[in-house]
Image (cartoon, rainbow, N blue to C red):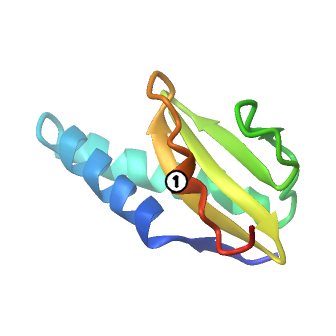
Amino acid sequence: MKVEWSPLALERVEGIAHYIAEDDPSAAVRWVEGLFESVERLAEFPESDRVVPEVGVHRIREVIFGKHRVIYSVRGTVQMLTIRRGSQLLRLGELDDGQA
């Protein structure tokens, strides 16, 4: 299955990487590389992570990567929808995968 990134998810990756890079640019590079590596396994195992509890929809799932939740949708492809710190509330508007 193909793994795709929404514009919002990529924007979040960039923002987090910039924040990390303020203190340690090489740590930011490692973080981004680790993030992309951790979600690539979803191409083979798209339903291997838990359903997002506050949504309760089978196709909306999340990967926990460090202190972040990577929210994605499984339907034909694996679509990365958004990334949030685990302590942040999930905004349901960020889950628009065009397949409601």
Q: SS class of the residue under badge 1? A: helix
Q: Which residue is mark 1?
A: 93
Going 53% across and 37% down the picture, which residue do you hit?
A: 90
Query: Is residue 83 left or right of 54 when viewed as pictured?
Result: left
Image quadrant occupied by the C terminus: bottom right
Query: Is residue 68 left or right of 61 when viewed as pictured?
Result: left
Residue 25 coordinates in the image, percent (x, y): 18, 46
**24 is higher (above) or lower (below) than 81:** above
Going 30% across and 58% down the picture, which residue do you hit?
A: 14
Query: Is residue 94 left or right of 1 when viewed as pictured?
Result: left
Residue 1 coordinates in the image, percent (x, y): 82, 75
> Between 29 and 90, which is closer to the camera in this rendering?
90
> Between 54 and 30, which is closer to the camera in this rendering?
54
**95 is higher (above) or lower (below) than 91:** below
Residue 94 coordinates in the image, percent (x, y): 51, 54
Going 37% across and 54% down the picture, which residue do you hit?
A: 12
Q: Residues within 10 Å of mark 1 (few under 14, many from 20)?
A: few
Going 38% across and 55% down the picture, which residue do you hit?
A: 13
**28 is higher (above) or lower (below) than 68:** below
